[in-house]
Image (cartoon, helix red, strand yellow):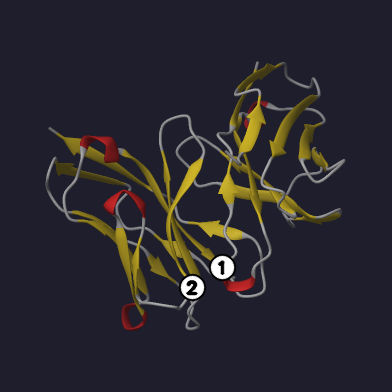
Amino acid sequence: DAMVIQNPRYQVTQFGKPVTLSCSQTLNHNVMYWYQQKSSQAPKLLFHYYDKDFNNEADTPDNFQSRRPNTSFCFLDIRSPGLGDAAMYLCATSLPTGDLETQYFGPGTRLLVL
Amino acid sequence: AQSVTQLGSHVSVSEGALVLLRCNYSSSVPPYLFWYVQYPNQGLQLLLKYTSAATLVKGINGFEAEFKKSETSFHLTKPSAHMSDAAEYFCAVRDTGRRALTFGSGTRLQVQP
C-alpha cells in the first residue's frame, strides 16, 4: 500500500544534542510537510517542501531545519533540542490537485528530550 | 488567516448514541474544510473533506458532515457511536491559494459501553 512512513516511532535525545527525524513516502507526492504536535494540542505546521522549494512558516524557530534530498525522503533536524521541543512530529504529503488537494499523514515520531 | 473553533474539548456518548462534534470556521468566503481523526499515538487519518461540491459530505466509518454557510459551521455527525470511534477529532481549514492546514484545538470523543 502507498503510504507515509516515519522512523523511528519514538526518539529519545538529550538536551542540546542534535537529532534527526525521518519521513519517507511511496505516494510520489510533490509536497511534504512537517508538523509539531505538543501534548493535547493541535498540530502546528513548521514548514513544507513543494518539490525542492522550501517554505518556512514565519514563527518556526531557527532551531528547526529540514532537508529533502529526493521526492521520497524528507528529514527534520533539530539542532539543539530543548525541553520544550518534546512533542509528536508528524510528516504529511500531498499532491497539488487544486480544490481536491488533501494531506496524508504518517504515524508520527514522538520525541522525548531528557 | 482562517481559523476554526471546535466547541467542546471532550464529548462523551453512549455506544449506539448520536455523535455530534462541532466546528465553526471564521471566514466569509467558504474555505476548504477537513475532519481528521487521531487514535492514541497515531498520525491523523482523513475522515472527510468539503470542497464546495456538495454541502453534505460523507466520509469513512459512517461519519458525515454538513457545511452550513449561514452558520459558518461544518459539524461532524455519526448516527450510532461505536466503541472504536473513541479518539481525538480535529477540524481543519485550508485557505484558497495556500497549502497549510490550520487545525482546531481538537475534541476527544469517549464512547461509554
For the residues labelled 2 and 1, the Cα–Cα distance comes to 7 Å
Quadrant in which residue B87 is drawn: top left
The answer to whether the residue labelled 2 contacts the one labelled 1, judged by CB atoms less than 8 Å apart, is yes
The N terminus of chain A sits in image quarter: top right
Q: Is residue B107 left or right of residue B34?
A: left
Task: Categorize mark 2 by other alpha carbons within 10 Å: few (<14), some (14-19), many (20+).
Answer: some
Above or below, B74 relative to A23 = below
Under tag 1, what secondary structure? helix
The residue that disc 1 covers is: A100
Task: Categorize mark 1 by other alpha carbons within 10 Å: few (<14), some (14-19), many (20+).
Answer: few
Quadrant in which residue A12 is drawn: top right
Q: Is residue B84 left or right of residue A25?
A: left
| Mark 2 on the same chain as mark 1 | no
Seen from the viewer's position, the closer of residues B83 and B41 is B83
Residue ranking furthest to the front: A1
Q: Which of the chains bears the disc numbered 2?
A: B
Seen from the viewer's position, the closer of residues B51 and B108 is B51
Q: Is residue A14 left or right of residue A35?
A: right
Q: Give the numbered dot on residue A68.
A: none
Above or below, A50 relative to B110 = below
The C terminus of chain A sits in image quarter: top right
The x, y position of residue A108, in whole percent, is 58, 33
Under tag 2, what secondary structure? loop
The x, y position of residue B12, in whole percent, is 20, 43
What type is the residue that disc 2 sits on?
Thr
The residue that disc 2 covers is: B51
Above or below, A88 relative to A49 = above
Query: Residue drawn at (78%, 36%), measured in percent from left and top?
Result: A75
Quadrant in which residue A8 is drawn: top right
Seen from the viewer's position, the closer of residues B27 and A108 is A108
